Image (cartoon, rainbow, N blue to C red):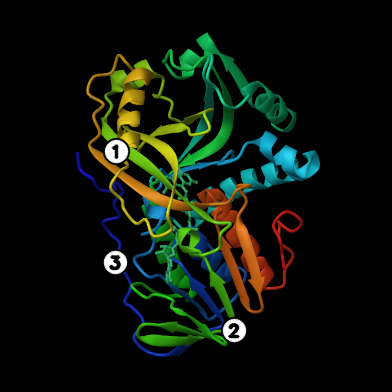
Amino acid sequence: MKHEVFWQNPGYEPRPKLVNDIECDYLIVGGGVAGVSTAYFLAKLGAKNIVLIEKGQIASGATGKAAGSLVVRGESDLVDHINIHGRETAERYWNRIQETLKEMFATIKDEEIDCDAEPQDTLYCGFEHKSDIDLTREYEEEKKIDSRAKFLEREELKKELNTDLYTHGILSVGHGLSVNPLKFTQNLSRALDKYGVTIYEDTSYLGSEGNVAKTPSGNIKYKKLVLAIDADHPALEVTTVNSTIVITRPLTEDELTKTGLIVKKIVWDSQKDYHYFKLTKDNRLLFGFGGMFVDKNHRDTIPHLPHLEEIKDFSKKLFPYLDNLDPEYAWAGNFGMTNDYEPHFKFDGDTIEMAGAGTQVVCFMAAEHIAHILLNKSSPMDGYFPSK
Ligand SMILES: Cc1cc2nc3c(=O)[nH]c(=O)nc-3n(C[C@H](O)[C@H](O)[C@H](O)COP(=O)(O)OP(=O)(O)OC[C@H]3O[C@@H](n4cnc5c(N)ncnc54)[C@H](O)[C@@H]3O)c2cc1C
């Protein structure tokens, strides 16, 4: 087993680091999906003179270590949103996140982003006895908004996913997009070249004095600053969560048919600390587990051993009839999360900070919101995300 991230992007050439003083209108710090898509939305909305700096490589943070399951129902359920915001706002949010997923797919097509994108349905599965989350209530709420949602009992569920581990599940049609997340964000950053966005990698933001950002080998004078550094954000509201992923050998055609995954789908379950899995483009099983809170300085990509063992055990219980699901790759990554699963925004003069979005779809949605605010335009997320 290799203790390394499976995702590769062979054609990608990193940009040079900043070595002189420069000026720009919009400076974005952080080259994850949040920062890169903020630059993208700004450029698409007509902003000029945009610079992005990244301390490592583009997508070297959470973004390039993720599972690449872009889904409507992310870290929080529809019922959670209804409980916190009331039905009307929750429905608006739900519809908006569906729109965002479509926008991500449209962006992939429009910008010809090579990222192994595959639109898929999602399957949210429950256990007979030990479910932490009530899927019946979740389904009832979803059905009111989306008539395509299906509640599957044991035998129907087995047609979609041939396992005895789960007893029921919600099949949400068109709620998922599977990507290679490293390729998605690195190649989106490549698309920024044609919009005139300048990117510096290997360039750390050390802080600002007035409207001048300091980096180790050059200062950047800016009009507006966006900090999109997720788990590195110092705010106490943004906790750092560690999750482990493993990748198996590719499944054969027979195995795909037997498991029900011949029709690919993105799956996770209803435990608070949940298992998630999908197939990669080359039909390997990707399993993920673990929402372990870690210190902000935790940088290890070596998988957490108890989580690794948990995943191996889980894969055997899920598909006991498949031989050799031993991991070929295993790694761990950190991402930022907040208590209420909503991104943390801070507006301070010419600076906007965003962290803890929890999923890449919410990052994309937050990026679109930030770009609209910076350009004094009304945002599709006004009234849901804060604007000042
Ligand atoms: C193992 C794992 C699995 C996941 N699976 C999924 C999934 O399937 N679907 C999903 O939607 N989400 C998933 N997530 C969550 C998702 O990846 C994150 O929510 C998202 O990528 C965060 O993006 P970001 O741009 O905010 O942060 P990041 O990708 O972490 O980007 C922030 C960037 O800022 C840079 N930076 C930090 N400090 C500085 C500085 N001082 N100067 C310059 N640059 C700086 C970092 O190097 C980093 O590249 C997963 C996360 C992990 C770790």
* Element type at mark 1: helix
The extreme bottom residue here reads 21
Question: Which residue bears the numbered disc 3?
Answer: 13
Residue 305 is labelled as 1
Disc 2 from disc 1: Cα separation = 46 Å
In the picture, measured across the screen, residue 248 lies left or right of residue 134, that is left
Q: Amino acid at mark 3?
A: Glu
Categorize mark 2 by other alpha carbons within 10 Å: few (<14), some (14-19), many (20+).
Answer: some
Q: Quadrant of residue 311?
A: top left
Disc 3 from disc 2: Cα separation = 29 Å
| Location of the C terminus (image quadrant) | bottom right
| Location of the N terminus (image quadrant) | top left
33, above or below 333, in the image: below
Q: Position of residue 193 (x, y in %)?
A: 43, 71
In the picture, measured across the screen, residue 340 lies left or right of residue 306, that is right
In the picture, measured across the screen, residue 279 lies left or right of residue 136, that is left
Question: Which residue bears the numbered disc 2?
Answer: 223
* Element type at mark 2: loop
Q: Position of residue 349 (x, y in %)?
A: 66, 78
Mark nearer the N terminus (2 vs 1) = 2
